[in-house]
Image (spheres, grey):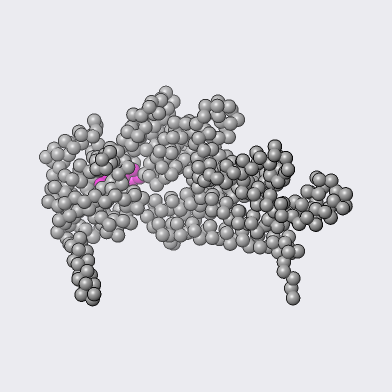
Amino acid sequence: MRKLITAVSLALMATSFGAYAKDWKEVRFGVDASYAPFEAKAPDGKLVGFDIDLGTEICKRLNAKCVWVENDFDGMIPALKAKKFDGVLSSMSITEARMKEIAFSAKLFNTPTRMVAKKGSGLMPTAASLKGKRVGVEQGTIQESYAKAHWAPGGVEVVPYQNQSLVLADLASGRLDASLQDAVQADEGFLKKPEGKAFAFAGGDLVDEKILGTGAGIGLRKEDTDLKAAIDKAIAGMLKDGTYKKIEKKYFSFDVYGK
Amino acid sequence: MIDIIQQYWKAFLWSDGYHLSGLAVTMWLLSLSIVFGFCAAIPLSIARVSKSRWLSFPVWLYSYVFRGTPLYIQLLFFYAGVYSLNVVKETEILNHFFREGYYCTILAFGLNTCAYTIEIFSGAIKATPYGEIEAGRAYGMNKFTLYRRVIIPSALRRALPAYSNEVILMLHSTTVAFTATVPDILKVARDANAATYDSFNAFGLAAIIYLCITFILVGLFRKAESKWLAHLRPMKA
């Protein structure tokens, strides 16, 4: 019996050391597959999307095996720190607040933040135009921070919601005058659907690097500098030899890498 | 913990800078729904114990529906469901009422706690000792006076312990309010969590605030019981 316990514990130790060995034979990415077209699940349960393809390509360049671990988005950073996976590849925006907790790879893409309002409402994404109006945002997003910093002081009523689908439901029902979110998300999840046909983007891309960040990257533990270097190299390589453009074309008709 | 308190104490207690939030909102929701529920429950619980089917059945049905469905669904029904109807949007007063998340929330909470309160009160009315009623009748009281002076005061006193539970459960139920964009204590905790990723302290702090409110509520009800239920206290030896 004692021998068995020793054997089992030795085996466990071996695997746990194996998993954290620094040669990165295997890279585990945390993903919340609820954000098409970046990461979603195909009907057969397979993970698909822009992020998934990028991750697979990065692993190929690292000569490592890609393992995808599904995790809720709001628990990504604690799970990354608890070593449940080695990177967060789930459209995570690079922001100052997150930089305090974790490191980020080079930028993967930078989708714009845009406002949606009823067609012909004439609203523009400025405090002056939105004064006295209600604008919905999802709680905890960079868009919420933007609206609270730029619009709320000017008399715009910024209403935070628990999730994006509630924002869009209230926009459709008329409770909100406008909503502020990631442009791709609004386009795929609302404007292209029948319930969004009376709505359109209002105004152009919003710019505020400090709040809206500089795009999305792969979230990494601060101590894994070797992995960051390897991933950054892979991303630079993809951008240079055109592989990135090829993957991008599969999902988007416009440039998502951004400025 | 200190960071979250420094950054969010105002939002946790009364204001996020533009609107009421946190404790102030939770207490508003709790007190308005409790007042609404209590006032409506007294006549309805009398109807509930009435011998007339026409009076008791609708009240029974109402309380059955509201006790038989989750409060979360009731809130979604009033907030999202009712407002999606064209009739509501086209009627000026209904549109004005259901447009506001606050009104929908208080309506749902009030109707919910009222349903439970009806059952508590009607149970207490049914359990009124027959002697009390007989004594009232012997004084020549009519039905109204009998209810006003004997049955209701006696029943409400005896219902106090069960009612205090309902109030505390209602406090816990207010945590679903953010579904209708009402920024209660839990919403601020979510904000703090999303901004700092310090889940343990963000939600721990919210839990402590709820514990403090419960502590005060329990204390108030204990005071009330020692005043109004003194006649039911075991005699001191």
Quadrant where the N terminus of chain B sits is: bottom left
The x and y percentages for residue A205 are 33, 34
Question: Who is closer to the viewer here, B7 or A26?
Answer: A26
Task: Say if the magenta span includes residue A215.
Answer: yes
Q: Quadrant of residue A135?
A: top left
x and y, in percent, of residue B42 in the image: 70, 47
Give coordinates of residue B90: x percent, y percent: 55, 25
**Residue shown at the point (58%, 27%) measured from the top left:** B91
Relative height, residue A200 to residue A236 (above, below) = above
Residue at the top extreme? A120
Judging depth in this view, the residue of A100 and A141 nearest the camera is: A141
Residues A191 and A232: in front is A191
Image quarter (top left, top right, bottom left or bottom right) of the C terminus of chain B:
bottom right
Residue in the image at 30% along x and 44% along y: A33
Whether residue B100 sits left or right of residue A36 in the image: it is right
Q: Residue at x 55, y 29 (%)?
A: B88
Residue A5, picture quadrant: bottom left
Q: Is residue A88 visible from the viewing direction of this image?
A: no
Q: What is the tally of numbered marks visible in this picture?
A: 0
Q: Residue at x 80, y 57 (%)?
A: B131
Instruction: Judge from the rendering whether residue B190 lies leftward or rightward of residue B228; answer left or right.
Output: left
* Above or below for A213 versus B12: above
Q: Which residues are magenta?
A: A210-217
* B62 is higher (above) or lower (below) than B163: above
Tell me where residue B198 appears, x and y as whole percent: 39, 57
Residue A1 magenta: no
Evaluate whether residue A89 shows in this view.
yes
Q: Nearer the viewer, residue B64 or A81?
A: B64
